Image: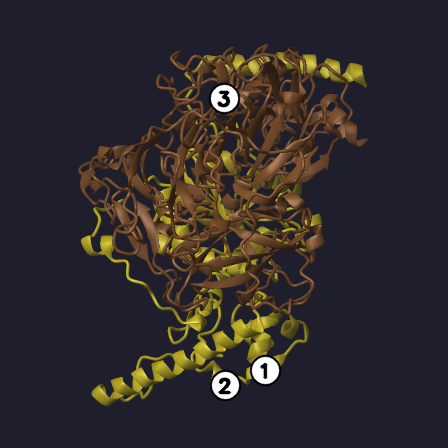
Amino acid sequence: MGRKDDREGFWLSENSDRRRIRDAEQARKNRAEINKALSHGQVSRRDLVKWGLFTSAGLMAPIGGLSPFVRPMNAQTSSFSFGTRSGGSGIPTGLPSSPLFGVLPFTQPMPRFDVFQRNPVSSLSPAPQAQANQTQQPLDPALVGGQTGLTGPIEGRPPGAIWAHQRFAQNPPVIGIDASTSPATTNTTYNPQVPSSLNSGINPATPIPLKFHPSMPTQQPNSVWTFNGTIPPKLMLGRYGEPILFRHHNRLPADVTQNNGFGRNTLSTHEHNGHHGAENDGFTGAYFFPNQFYDYHYPFVLAGFTTINATATDPKAGSPNGSGGINKVPGDWHETMSTHWFHDHMFSFTAQNVYKGDAGMLNIYSALDRGNEAINDGVNLRLPSGTTLDWGNLDYDVNLMFSDKAWDSNGQLNMDIFQFDGFLGDRMTVNLAYKPFFQVERRKYRFRMLNASVSRFFVFALSDSSTMVQIANDGNLLPQTVPLNQLDQMGIAERFDIVIDFSRYTIGQTVDLVNLQEHRDGKGPGQILTVSGALSGSSSDPAVGACLRFQVVRDPAVPDQSICPNTPITLIPNPDLSKIPIARTRQFVFDNNANQTQNDPVTSYTGGGNWGIATENTGGSRFSRGGSALKADFGRISSAPKFGTREVWILKGGFNWDHPIHIHFEEGQILARNGSFSNVPQAERGRKDVYRLKEDGTVTITMQFRDWGGMFMEHCHNTMHEDNAMLMRWEVNAAGGVFLNPLPTPIPKPTGVTFQAPDEILTNAF
Amino acid sequence: MQRNIWTRFIGISFLLAGALAILYSRPVLADSRWGANYFPNIELTTQDGKTVHFYDDLIKGKMVAIDLIYTTCQYSCPLETARLAQVQKMLGDRVGKDIFFYSITIDPKNDTPAVLKAYAEKFHAGPGWTFLTGKKEDIDFLSKKLGLYSDPKLSQDGHTPHLLLGNEPMGQWMRNSALDNPRFLSQMIGDFLDSFRNMKPAQGKENTESAAIHLDPGQYLFTKKCGACHTVGQGDKIGPDLVGVTDTRNRDWLMRKIQHPEQLLAERDPITMALAEKYGNVNMPNLRVSDDDANYMIGYLVSRTSELQRQAQAQNAVTKPAGGAGGMARPNQ
């Protein structure tokens, strides 16, 4: 039996006719009914076996009408199979194909992000404070299993000095942003911050129900949970030297069962990849409950601010001052960052919660990247943006969030929570809109692209294979721009900022953004197709092909003043670390079941093992493999780099997997891929915070540990992997030892956060 | 061939209609999306030889911890099982009441109910923790549905120490490592997945105390890797009390025992064989301990032993009991 036959058996492609999809849904219902009848004792197993509905093993027989993956009306030669690698059954992983309700691609405008209101911090009540606000409030009985009369703190941040905002007095919050994560509702306050002519004609005054397409069903409140409960996704605007207090309310249902099958009602929000104190990092174990808020303090400082340019004299280290000038800030301007995102980081439930909608983006503005293409002060890089505002013009600077989704027969967002090896959706969305179009003028645009998927990698090209200029990687402007006809592979959580010059097209032309990256399962990407191959529709992966259509609609109203030619130009050189000694080299192995062959003599922390991140020596032989890999118990300290030093970390991937590894806290530079700098693509030669290891690949990076202390994380950003142990905690530690001075681990409960020592207790003998 | 399938399908459709007709005559209970319509109700056999159905008898309406094991495992399973025993101890009498543990063998050929029963006893598995075997294909299917399956081609023994924690009526499921901190695992299942049903009002001090903590590397490693089976001075557990072991065994042997226990067993090392006999033939797992870490562990055994001796002497100086060594257990190795 050929591979194709194998797939035919259990893949329902986008092209499946509606009857087949209906059959599949009916099959699912039939299975459920029979199981229920059986469990209620209305029929016996023997009866079912006798009738041929059950195999003697107790499994539902592989026959049409019972399995959503078996064709009832066609000759079917392949045997029933639950997949060979992951237990999955195609795409979407573990689920039947998502119906399209007659919707055709590129029939809805792509909404621009919904910009958070920036208010004076005084608008927040109660006023934010350095230590968590422990004012008590009555607890919803549903939070404590029906108990009444209990109280808990209004803020979910762990209390006390260790979790107080670091350097709060030096960086008092100026801007207050008050937001929530809430069940799906209609948006009546859409604030795209651009005229509707630059938003494909969308009238922001028209209420926006939560739908993936206007002709698809409205999402029920607990099918989708987003910031403020609405679409489009939210955009935070920040600038260096202007601290923001992000007050995040949890307005999710207190009853954990009210989740339409997936999602956890506790939250921890990670500003990816903010250089902030650990108390604001969205530590996976510092989660907060419904009816609580958590105050995140984002000071927006340049890395190195405690040691480099500490008196703020360098104009390149600056922030737009609101009137065409620059406010100088301390720190190293080579560390300037631009495009971040923020998302849930809840222990064990990150994949479900981010997939459910808990993700937004953050643009950070600086003197170098101020979001104004006209100001010519010798510092401003004048990237495509606009000219109306002093900083933060969004006219020609567009955030794009790519994510694959799946929905059930009623159109409600759907996920198989048991696909621990990775979950793939079959429907591509951009800014949570199914395959939209976007109207552009004949000029240059900047696109801030984010891969917000659970397990899907992308490779993007334009349908005419014309040039895109990559200007930033993971939100860091590159040392040199990189013109490309096909972008590099984009792992989960990676951000690529690109510039496309639409002046080469005529009015009325369209050009599509095409995904060339095919997946067969959620463990890692499969083959990369050609543009024509991807557009042909022959891939069995429904997320391959065009996902966003650009419609060229007019000449620019005002001349394009931005600078970004189709040839390389200098943007922000990397900080020169060559003079800083390497304090330590560590090795991390991200692996499921590696055949670890040898110890690496240069490292103190090598290792292999099962799921998880091994950071210890392997004393074993080639074939010894056990449980030495550290698991995701966030109470365990794995590494503690010494404060104020630079280290080299070697990240090793595993056999048959690909892990995009995210290291919190400070940007790293890639020194080598598989041992050589020449293997590092041009577009990866800046600073980064997510590192794709590729199958069995090795990435050598260097990072500094400075400015802030506390507990941070390093993990695989395939959130299904992350949730299942591929995560460890490390701390910046003044003493530099692995075991010394670890911080107590917060244990959040509705009644308040308690602390535990990060070791394991000695138990008494039996 | 085509025709046969057709005929069969039509036949089944009639049967289905019959089955559904029965169903619709009764009120339909609301159930979680991750309930009877998701979990296979396969037949399994307990260590006591009792036949049970996975969904109906084992998980329906319960909070559960499920792992896959095999009793001849030389790698992580023994530690996994010892860890779960610690978790069980911490959860106390809730195990068997509202929380249930299931260890399902992936090697049903060898792991008969009798073998599983002996294995459970070695690890002091208490009531509410059931060891299960069944048909290989059923168990493979079940483990895929639970997200616990490991492809035997991709690992040496086709086993990964995952631990699935779930609350069936609430539809909450999470996969952890069975090697994780037992206290952490017990909180995850006992509080978090139970939606904090047994929450008490917060204690004032506990709520705000967050001083930094100092840990000794040897103690940390001992607790993490050895503490599930051994104590220092608190008596035997699954393996011997290790108080004074550094005086009775030479260092090279100790290093080998810590790093390569399976080699000593294979060589039929006399000390190892005697210990195996005494402690129920539980395989000490190879936990891939590095030289550095093994040295830290031995250092901890030395320092902890002398600390206990000092305490015992101080105690003797005060009370002068007849026994000499105070309350300290004798080395058993």
The subunit carrying tag 3 is A
Q: What colour denotes chain A? A: brown
Question: Can residue A550 be seen from the camera position used here?
Answer: yes
Q: CA distance from mark 1 to mark 3?
A: 65 Å
Q: In the rendered view, tell whether residue B331 sits above or below residue A143.
A: below
Secondary structure of residue under mark 3: loop
Q: Residues under labels 2 and 1: Cα distance?
A: 12 Å
Q: Which residue is mark 1?
A: B252
In the rendering, at what x and y percent does residue A45 appear?
57, 28
The quarter holding residue A17 reads top right
Q: Which residue is mark 2?
A: B248
Amino acid type at image mark 1: Asp
Residue type at the position of mark 2: Thr
Rendered residue at 49%/65% (across/down): B225
Query: Where does the C terminus of chain A fall, quadrant-wise?
Result: bottom left
The amino acid type found where label 3 is placed reads Gln
* Front-lying residue, A117 or A184: A117
Which dot marks residue A42?
3
Q: Which chain is drawn using yellow? A: B
Judging depth in this view, the residue of B143 and B176 nearest the camera is B176
Closer to the eye: label 1 or 3: 1
Are there few (<14), some (14-19), or many (20+) residues within 10 Å of tag 3? Answer: some
| Nearer mark to the viewer, of 3 and 2 | 2
Which chain is home to disc 2?
B
The image shows residue A419 at horizontal and vertical percentages of: 56, 37
Residue A725: numbered disc: none
Up-down: is B109 above or below A428? Answer: below
State how many labels appear.
Answer: 3
Q: Nearer the viewer, residue A713 or B288?
A: A713
Q: Secondary structure at mark 1?
A: helix
